Image: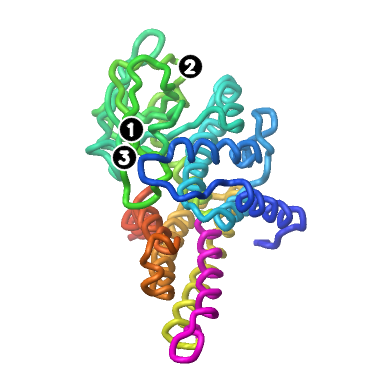
């Protein structure tokens, strides 16, 4: 494995960081008031080329390899002190765009990918239901076969980008008796009759990332909008999950890098009892632990990216990465607050927001407990 970077790749990362620092609006915002803020930054990212990183040029992208795309998203997480936007971008890029790129027909690629890359179209992936989270075999959203398409009925909850999405990849069953083998994927558009999106739901963190529910009431999906074959939904979903867990965490690595630098600077400047607080072992040990978490998570992230670049399976490694990096971000975010003391607990400091955002990482895309189950199963337990 070669994790070295070319001068061109490192220069591109620097451009992404500068773009994020100079161009993206990170004004404070209240929960529920994020739509204009979110779309402004979303469009700026599209104009820069973020959404098109891993998309071929013929579909409107800039066709970067997975390692370069990962490095760019790491730079975005470092340069922009707002975790919600990078997460939303990653959600579309790896669970929507790449899914269509890998499993879609040529007509579907031509129709949808350019809009995603340009920022004019926002996409969501809709899997979770009230009674089907990690156990997607219990999915109740039903697609009834018709001569020229399908009638979609059911609901999806806590879907990233749902309130602002123009297009959603919806997973539904065509045969409930077949469990997960009856699941099929469809490309639904908000302009279709029977497609309904609820407003954004408030969350503990990631306030600037619209998250909500989708409802389908006799929503007609033409046959040409089916993604893959009937019953292939579980394979498409698992493939999508591997890419999601492999790629969407790069921005968190950048956030941890930024977080560490901020803590080191504060520990050098803040004086108590006649010396900088970084001279106290309790503080310096926390910073040392943050550095160890950052570098070990970096190695695992780069390994997973390299495996995907080499077209090798990375299901086990992606699960380990999802578990480890998210748990590291939670612990380092807690350490950052402790290092900053009472000041770190205040919202005005900008320190505590990382902890609220980090908790979500232990839940979305498969909980930490599910990742442990996956790892254990793949180890033969």
Q: Earlier in the sequence, mark 3 or mark 2?
A: 3
Q: Is mark 3 on a helix, strand or loop?
A: loop
Whether residue 126 appears in this view of the structure is yes
Residue extending farthest to the top is: 147
What are the residue bounds of the magenta stretch?
252-278
Q: Is residue 180 magenta?
A: no
Answer with left or right where residue 131 lies relative to residue 377: left
CB contact under 8 Å: marks 1 and 2: no
Question: Up-down: is 271 above or below 379?
Answer: below
CB contact under 8 Å: marks 3 and 2: no
Tally the numbered discs.
3
Residue 105, how many percent across, how many down? 55, 23
Whether residue 309 appears in this view of the structure is no
Q: Tag 1: Cα neighbours inside 10 Å, few (<14), some, or many (≥20)?
A: some
Residue 283, how many percent across, how many down? 44, 82
CB contact under 8 Å: marks 1 and 3: yes
Q: Quadrant of residue 338?
A: bottom left
Residue 60, how many percent across, how many down? 66, 30
Task: Point out the frontmost of discs 3 and 2.
Answer: 3
Residue displayed at 64% across by 54% down: 17
Magenta-colored segment: predominant secondary structure? helix
Name the residue tied to disc 1: 199
Name the residue tied to disc 2: 224
Q: In which quarter of the image is the N terminus?
A: bottom right
Residue 304, how many percent across, how many down? 55, 55
Name the residue tied to disc 3: 201
Question: Up-down: is 299 above or below 165?
Answer: below
Residue displayed at 61% across by 27% down: 114
Q: Between marks 1 and 3, how big is the CA–CA gap?
A: 6 Å
Q: Between marks 3 and 2, how big is the CA–CA gap?
A: 32 Å
């Amino acid at each position: 494995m070669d994790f070295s970077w070319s001068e061109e790749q490192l220069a591109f990362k620097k451009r992404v960081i500068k773009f994020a620092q100079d161009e993206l609006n990170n004004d404070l915002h209240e929960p529920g008031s994020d739509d204009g803020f979110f779309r402004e930054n979303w469009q700026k990212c599209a104009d820069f080329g973020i959404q098109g990183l891993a998309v071929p040029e013929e579909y409107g992208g800039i066709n970067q390899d997975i390692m370069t795309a990962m490095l760019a998203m790491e730079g975005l997480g470092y340069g922009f002190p707002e975790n919600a936007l990078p997460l939303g971008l990653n959600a579309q890029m790896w669970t929507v765009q790449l899914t269509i790129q890998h499993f879609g027909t040529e007509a579907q690629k031509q129709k949808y990918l350019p809009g995603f890359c340009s920022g004019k179209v926002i996409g969501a992936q809709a899997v979770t239901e009230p009674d089907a989270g990690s156990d997607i075999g219990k999915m109740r959203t039903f697609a009834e076969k018709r001569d020229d398409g399908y009638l979609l009925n059911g609901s999806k909850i806590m879907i990233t980008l749902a309130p602002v999405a123009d297009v959603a990849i919806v997973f539904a069953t065509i045969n409930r008796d077949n469990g997960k083998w009856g699941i099929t994927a469809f490309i639904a558009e908000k302009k279709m009759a029977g497609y309904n999106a609820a407003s954004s739901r408030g969350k503990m963190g990631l306030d600037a990332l619209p998250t909500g529910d989708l409802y389908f009431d006799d929503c007609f999906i033409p046959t040409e909008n089916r993604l893959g074959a009937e019953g292939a939904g579980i394979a498409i979903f698992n493939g999508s999950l591997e890419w999601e867990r492999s790629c969407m965490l790069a921005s968190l690595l950048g956030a941890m890098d930024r977080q560490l630098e901020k803590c080191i600077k504060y520990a050098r400047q803040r004086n108590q009892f006649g010396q900088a607080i970084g001279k106290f072992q309790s503080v310096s040990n926390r910073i040392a632990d943050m550095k160890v978490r950052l570098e070990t998570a970096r190695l695992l992230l780069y390994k997973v990216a390299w495996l995907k670049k080499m077209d090798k399976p990375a299901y086990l490694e992606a699960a380990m990465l999802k578990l480890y990096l998210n748990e590291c971000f939670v612990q380092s975010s807690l350490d950052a607050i402790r290092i900053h003391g009472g000041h770190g607990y205040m919202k005005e400091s900008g320190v505590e927001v990382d902890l609220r955002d980090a908790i979500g990482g232990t839940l979305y895309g498969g909980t930490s407990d599910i990742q442990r189950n996956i790892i254990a199963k793949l180890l033969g337990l």
